[in-house]
Image: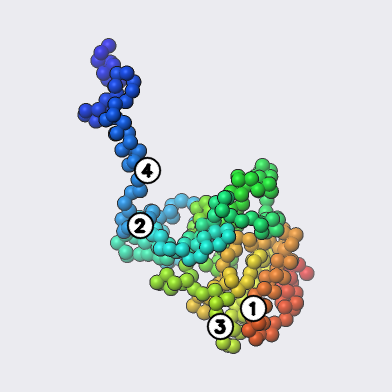
Amino acid sequence: MRDQSHRRRRRFDEDTTYARTGRITEAERAWLAKQREDAYSDPVLPGGGDRYSTWDTGERGPTPYPDWVVTELAAVDTELGVLKTGKEADVHLLRRGLPDGSRECLLAAKRYRSSDHRQFHRDSGYLEGRRMRRSRETRAMASRTSFGRNLIAEQWAVAEFTALGRLWTVGLPVPYPVQRNGTELLLEFLGDADGNAAPRLEQLRPGRDELEYLWFQAERALTQLAAEGLAHGDLSAYNVLVHDDRLMLIDLPQVVDVFANPGGPDYLARDAANPARWFVVRGLEINVPELVAKLYEQAGLR
């Protein structure tokens, strides 16, 4: 009997066992505390990274993957700072690379805010035409419960990632969507090798020739969007970047299906009017009603 009891006794190390009373000793309590500390401490990653690559989790961008995307699972991600803060999300600069420095790339990590820190005053119009599979989720989103707000946050991330993948595939000027994990999007960084982000259109003071070339690109992008049956939903000179002389559309969580959304035609018209206003102020002559009619035709609304 004594030998059987002895075999059941759990050991922490050579000198530490459970007390016969069922209470743990001070040595055992210290050992357990150390195990908890070790479990919650961050491992030291190679190359001084902040986390291992998350390429093996979540949803990936369209194939074929661009050559510059680091897909090796041995890579580590290093946080380099904040690029932009916003009402719905913050954008961070991230370097993903192999510890030996042989391959690396810069990424823009867009992270949607938690339900307690997001503003939802603009959600209702954009969410028209988007439906969840379960009525419980639809009700939670409509009533803006904590669960519903978290659903909205993830739905916006899903909508933006899906839209970017679709638009990048058909050749629109958008950053390549590398991957999505929950409410974090990893996107192609539009900027230089030193981590300086490309300027927004609003920041530029282009000459006449450059102004005309930029408007040519903007009009072409609007036409391509309309042909896909989509409206950006919030297009302006503030969410367009100019990278290597190329106009690039960003911030697409509120992308609108112009057929499913009752306000689709209005969003399409606003997408045309807002950026056109910026160009008109700087000296271009633009017939906005004519442009809107062209977009309606491209979208099949007329």
Q: Which residue is mark 2?
A: 49
Q: Residues within 10 Å of mark 4 (few under 14, many from 20)?
A: few
At x 60%, y 45%, the residue is 147
Q: Position of residue 176 (x, y in %)?
A: 51, 65
Q: Mark 1: which amino acid?
A: Trp
**Numbered mark located on residue 228 in the image:** none
Q: Mark 4: which amino acid?
A: Tyr
Q: Position of residue 110 (x, y in %)?
A: 51, 60
Q: Which residue is mark 4?
A: 40
Which of 221 and 110 lies nearest the eye of the viewer?
A: 110
Q: Is residue 218 above or below residue 36?
A: below
Q: Which corner quadrant holds the N terminus?
A: top left
Q: Which comes before the other along the chain, label 3 or label 1?
A: 3
Q: Mark 3: which amino acid?
A: Arg
Q: CA distance from mark 4 to mark 1?
A: 52 Å
Q: Position of residue 239 (x, y in %)?
A: 58, 69
Q: Is residue 15 above or below residue 103?
A: above
Give the quarter of the image for residue 21. Answer: top left
Q: Secondary structure at mark 2?
A: loop
Query: Contact, CB < 8 Å: mark 2 with mark 1?
Result: no
At x 59%, y 88%, the residue is 208
Q: Which comes before the other along the chain, label 2 or label 1?
A: 2
Q: CA distance from mark 3 to mark 1?
A: 11 Å
Q: CA distance from mark 2 to mark 1?
A: 42 Å
Q: Which corner quadrant holds the C terminus?
A: bottom right
